[in-house]
Image (cartoon, rainbow, N blue to C red):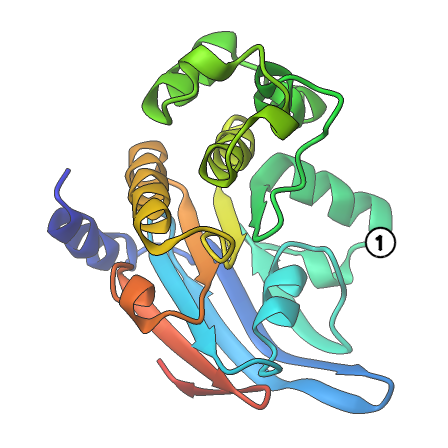
Amino acid sequence: MARGDRKAGCYICCMTDPLLDLRDIHKSYADTPVLSGVSLSMQAGETLALTGESGSGKSTLLHLAGGLDQPDSGAILLQGHDIAAMDDAARAEARRNRVGLIFQQFNLVPSLTVAANVALQARLAGRHDPAFCETLAQRLGLSDLLARYPEQLSGGQQQRVAIARALAPRPALILADEPTGNLDEETGDVVLSLLLDLVADTGAGLLMVTHSQRLASRLSRRIHLSRGVLVRE
């Protein structure tokens, strides 16, 4: 599917209920406001770039959306379920079953092979599909690396493993925090292209934090945070 078709498809899915709906989110740390009344929504299949200066609250918003933290107030609806109102165990279950996480630090398990790292999240979610993992490995150029360990891989290869691991359980939502931040520009462009293609193929939504306006322009929509407030959408 052409990238332009993905953008057009976003408007069609906007007729349905949001995949992710953040409503009037407030969050402070040590009495310092980080997010002040942020509201946004995104649809299944949409790719949304979150930009802003350092300290604007981007990573905090991403962590809240993934159930890694709780807001001080507000609602976070993921497929209609308010994860902000859940206890720790319920949030962990929602995150395991509905969310794929990709970070700037690859966070691979050093004692596991590439194949085991790719399958890890899907096994935890009880949705391990060996054929799909094999497809992801092929699409991401990992087929010849499955028996290696993370320390034997380049940065770009490790990030591809992290992407495969996040996508293996077929989550509804992918959250990516500066996923190409540790890569050179050329490798980062390749990795982002693969991520966008795979997200489009699986129908997942993608919310990606990035400092790069150039990379943000490749997603279907952009939003901007400044000092904890959404200033442009």
Establish if 230 lies above or below 112: below
Residue 117 seen by the camera: yes
State left or right for residue 197 relative to residue 188. left
Residue at 15%, 55% (x, y): give it.
Answer: 8
Establish if 32 lies above or below 217: below
Rendering quarter of residue 58: bottom right
Rendering quarter of residue 96: top right
Foreground pick, 233 / 197 = 197
User: Total marks drawn?
Assistant: 1
Residue at 53%, 52% (x, y): give it.
Answer: 175
Quarter in which the C terminus is drawn: bottom left
**Residue 40's x, y, as percent?**
47, 73
**Residue 78's x, y, as percent?**
57, 54
State left or right for residue 9 relative to residue 153. left
Residue at 84%, 51% (x, y): give it.
Answer: 88
Foreground pick, 165 / 88 = 165
Quarter in which the N terminus is drawn: top left
As helix, strand or loop, the secondary structure at mark 1 comes to loop
State left or right for residue 169 relative to residue 4. right
**Residue 51's x, y, as percent?**
44, 74
Establish if 123 lies above or below 202: above
**Residue 30's x, y, as percent?**
87, 85
Question: Which residue corresponds to mark 1?
Answer: 87
Foreground pick, 29 / 191 = 191
